[in-house]
Each structure stands twice: as C-alpha cells, then as structure tokens.
C-alpha cells in the first residue's frame, strides 16, 4: 500500500484508432499488469492527474479505471487511492507475453511456422467444407449501386417502429425476457399466418409457422431435417447460390433443373432423377432470371412430389414486389397433399438487419421442426418478434409494403429507362416485372466475371449471371450477363451509376 504511484507513461492514446479512448486506456493498463510491468500494490495517479497527463476527459479515465476495478485488476481504498490488486495469482500477474493477433510477429523467413493457421484436420468434415466457400456473392456491408437483394431501407418508417418498440417495452412481462417458444412468439406466428392467408394464398395455421433467422437459416434447417447424405435434390440452374451451398453442405446431391423464360423446367428435372428427395424452386420470381412459373408447371411439380413422396421447398423471397399487376399467389396454396415447405423473410419487406424469417411446414412436420429449433437454434430476439407482431397487427406493415411497392416501381422504371438510354446496344434486360433486381444479358462476348471486377474498381456493385450456375455447368451453356439491384438506389443516383456502367461495359 505504501508503494509510490507510477506515471503510466506506457499508455499511448490514438484518436485515429477504432477503439474508444477509454478502451485503449483499459487495454494498456490491463496488459501491463498481466505482463508484470505494473506490480501488485502499485498506486495509480489520481483520475484528475491522469486526465491532465493524457489530455482526455475525466469521464473517459474513470470509465477505464472502474472497469479494471470491477474485473479485479485494480482495487480502490477510500482516501488512499487506486492500487494494482495483490490478490491475483502470481501466474496471472507475471504472464510474460500479452496476447497478439495471429501472424503479428511472424518471421519473414518462415511465416508458416509462426502463423496460426486453421487446418482442416482440426474441424469436422462440415467445417472443412465451410472453409472453402467462395465469398464472391457475399452480401455487402451497406447498400450501394447496384447491390442485388437490398430494399429501399431509406424509406423505412423508423419513427413508427421506434414508437412501437417503446410501447412494447412498457408492456413487457418477465416471461417475454425468457428464451420463449422454440418456434417463435405466438402473436407473431398468428400475424404471419393471417397475412400469408390473405395476401399470398398460403394455407396454414399459426402452429405451422416456424420463426427463423431469415431465409438462409430456413433453407439450412429444411436441408438438415429432410435431406440425408447422398439424397438427390432438384435445384434451379441458374439459381440462388447460398441456398445451393446450404443443401450441398447438408450432403445433398444437386441435380440441375434447367431454367427458361418460364422458370424451372420441371419435366427435364424429374426426368433426370424421378426419385429426388427435395426440389428447391422460386416459382413466383425465379432468382436470378426473374421468370414466373406458370400454373401448368406448378401443378406438374406438385403431382411429382405427391407421387414420389418428395418435398418441395418454395422460396418466396421477394414475391410481394410485382409491378403493373397483382402479386402471384404462392404455389403452397395449391398443395393438396402436404408436400410443400414455404420459406419467406422480412429482410426485403421490413429491413435486413431485423434478421427474422419464417418456414411454413406441413402439419406432419410441425413436431420435428419444433424439436430441431429447440435443440439447435431458437429464433432471434423475443422483443423484436413482439415489435414486428405489433407492426403487422396495427396495419403499419401493410401501409409500408404499399409504399415500398410504389418506391421500388419508381426506381425500377428509372433503372430500365436508364439502361435503354445508355446501354441498349450492350445490354438486354430480362425478368424486370418483379422483385428488387434486374438481370441483363450481355450482347458482347466479354466475360461477365471480368466486367463485374472492373465495375467494382469503379465503385459499382453487380453480380455475374454466369456465376449463378452450378460449377458443373459447361461455360458454353451459361448465359452471360449482369445482375443489378435497383431498389436500394435513389432515382437521382441511378443514372449516375449507369453512366459508370456504360464506361465499363463494351
């Protein structure tokens, strides 16, 4: 206790770093204690002295010191000051080397020996496969021209949502702070069932609604519960890459179903593998081509599933957005034999950060899906579910969706007219009557992958249409084009973005 104080001259603060100043102070003192630079019993200068020494606010200093006291690195004696704790073990206090990021001290002569590399032998077979996933189609951190799949988040009624959040917290019960039901909050499941019955033609009861963390988790859950290793799965080609990855990582064997201007060619797919266990389709708005599957093909697919005792996974990801006509009812509403699992998400109709979606399962699958969610992954925040339920029940969701349709229609029109004005000699738009994106075929023989790379260097995001095909598809059989998202870009910025595209595409 009688040891003199130290000036803590080793603390170096940098306002340009991402870490807050109090975090920098905390880490510097903590690491110095662990490294033995600050010995047990050493008294620290007063917070007022440290404020002057470091040129920061007293609040910043106190926040760092209080955290170190709370974690036991320091202790305060009223009237005497703050000291390095002498109750920690010698092993902890004398740790010779603070943690540094892997590779920070690696040798230039032999970096492999010093770098902390994860080996495939250290993880499961599934983990090893995840290590090799291509991130080329990964979501961007923020909406930008022309990122596919991003809605007009700038139009979301944040004031309404905030008001509902405050109201829900005022009425929240202790039970609402628990883990909740594995399949999600019952009020939200009721709201979703009611909405889907009225607006998407889906036939379901609230108990059939499973709340999940979005479409991707829904596809992953369905794959793991219904597809055994080696089972064949019919999949649209080209198709949604992340869904295909999820199915393959569940050890399903993908059998490619060709896609034409009417969506998946069902007869071609079932002829290839009549005994497939599952078929994944996006019938209302095929991704990425944008086609709509006609009633004849829908009935053909349903008949195949009924006869084969197979399952159909219907991904209805952005079907609420259809321009110039009413949205097309879901295929699930035509299912008389209980073979369709319907997946949807609020990412496109509310906002992506909400991280909530749903899986509508046939009655005979309710118990197995509930048990899977109980064991593996419960849905997101119970409070967010209550807020979303109120947002739907009070009519805000319906009003927001109608407004979003108008906004997206305006942006779609601006995009299509911009392409016709600036790029009609180089691009042909297809499938633009619905959804949040447009696919455009290249008229030149230039690689769409190369064009996407060059667009990225110019600050423009797009996807190469050829990369939505299964890797086994010969290059000559792939359509070459670009996939643009128009919904997240204001009309005033669309023409500027397309002008940059025109400079690259030739």
Image (tube, rainbow, N blue to C red):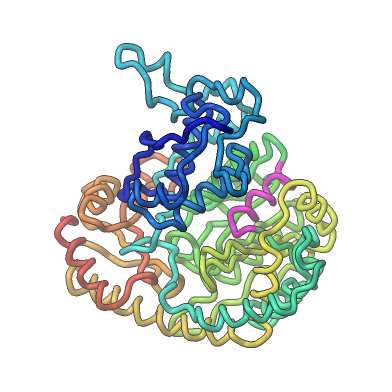
Q: Position of residue 185 (x, y in %)?
A: 76, 68
- Asked if residue 220 lies in the magenta stretch, the reply is yes
Q: Position of residue 14 (x, y in %)?
A: 32, 46
Vertical relation: 232 (above or below) 259: above
Q: Position of residue 203 (x, y in %)?
A: 74, 74
> Where the C terminus falls, by quadrant?
bottom left
Vertical relation: 449 (above or below) 390: above
Name the residue nearer the viewer: 141 or 414.
141
Name the residue nearer the viewer: 326 or 148.
148
Range of magenta residues: 213-227
Residue drawn at x 76%, y 52% as measured from the top left: 373
Report which quarter residue 501 is drawn in. bottom left
Kindly report the secondary structure that dominates the magenta region of the rendered protein.
helix
- Asked if residue 268 lies in the magenta stretch, the reply is no
Report which quarter residue 83 is drawn in. top right
Name the residue nearer the viewer: 380 or 166.
166
* Residue 453 showing in the rendered view: yes
Please give left or right for residue 176 compared with residue 444 in the image. right
């Amino acid at each position: 206790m009688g040891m003199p104080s130290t000036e803590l001259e080793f603390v170096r603060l940098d306002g340009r770093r991402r870490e807050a100043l109090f975090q920098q102070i905390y880490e510097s003192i903590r690491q110095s204690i662990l490294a033995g630079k600050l010995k047990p019993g050493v008294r620290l200068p007063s917070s007022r002295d440290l404020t002057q020494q470091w040129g920061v606010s007293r609040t910043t200093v106190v926040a760092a010191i209080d955290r170190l006291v709370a974690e036991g690195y320091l202790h305060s004696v009223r009237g005497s000051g703050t000291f390095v704790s002498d109750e920690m073990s010698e092993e902890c206090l004398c740790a010779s080397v603070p943690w540094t990021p892997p590779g920070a001290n690696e040798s230039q002569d032999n970096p492999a020996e010093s770098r902390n590399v994860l080996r495939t032998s250290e993880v499961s077979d599934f983990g090893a496969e995840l290590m090799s996933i291509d991130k080329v189609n990964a979501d961007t951190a923020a909406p930008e021209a022309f990122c596919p799949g991003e809605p007009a988040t700038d139009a979301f009624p944040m004031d309404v949502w905030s008001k509902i959040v405050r109201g829900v917290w005022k009425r929240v019960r202790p039970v609402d702070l628990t883990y909740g039901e594995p399949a999600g909050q019952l009020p939200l499941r009721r709201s979703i069932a009611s909405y889907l019955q009225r607006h998407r033609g889906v036939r379901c009861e609230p108990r059939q609604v499973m709340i999940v963390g979005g479409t991707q988790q829904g596809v992953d859950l369905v794959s793991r519960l219904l597809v055994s290793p080696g089972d064949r799965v019919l999949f649209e080609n080209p198709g949604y890459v992340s869904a295909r990855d999820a199915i393959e990582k569940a050890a399903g064997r993908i059998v490619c179903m060709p896609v034409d201007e009417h969506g998946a060619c069902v007869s071609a797919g079932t002829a290839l593998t009549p005994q497939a266990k599952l078929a994944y389709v996006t019938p209302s708005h095929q991704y990425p081509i944008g086609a709509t599957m006609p009633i004849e093909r829908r009935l053909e697919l349903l008949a195949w599933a009924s006869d084969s005792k197979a399952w159909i996974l219907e991904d209805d990801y952005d079907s609420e957005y259809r321009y110039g006509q009413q949205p097309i009812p879901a295929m699930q509403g035509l299912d008389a034999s209980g073979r369709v699992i319907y997946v949807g998400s609020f990412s496109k109709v509310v906002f992506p950060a909400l991280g909530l979606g749903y899986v509508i399962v046939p009655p005979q699958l309710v118990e197995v899906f509930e048990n899977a969610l109980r064991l593996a992954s419960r849905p997101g925040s119970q409070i967010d579910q209550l807020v979303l339920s109120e947002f739907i029940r009070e009519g805000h969701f319906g009003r927001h969706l109608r407004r979003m349709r108008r906004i997206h229609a305006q942006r779609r029109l601006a995009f299509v007219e911009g392409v016709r004005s600036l790029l009609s000699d180089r691009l042909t738009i297809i499938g633009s009557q619905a959804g949040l994106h447009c696919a455009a075929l290249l008229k030149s023989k230039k690689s769409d992958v190369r064009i996407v790379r060059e667009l990225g260097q110019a600050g423009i995001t797009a996807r190469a249409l050829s990369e939505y095909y299964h890797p086994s598809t010969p290059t000559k059989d792939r359509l070459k084009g670009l996939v643009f998202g128009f919904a997240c870009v204001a009309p005033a910025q669309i023409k500027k973005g397309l002008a940059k595209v025109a400079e690259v595409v030739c």
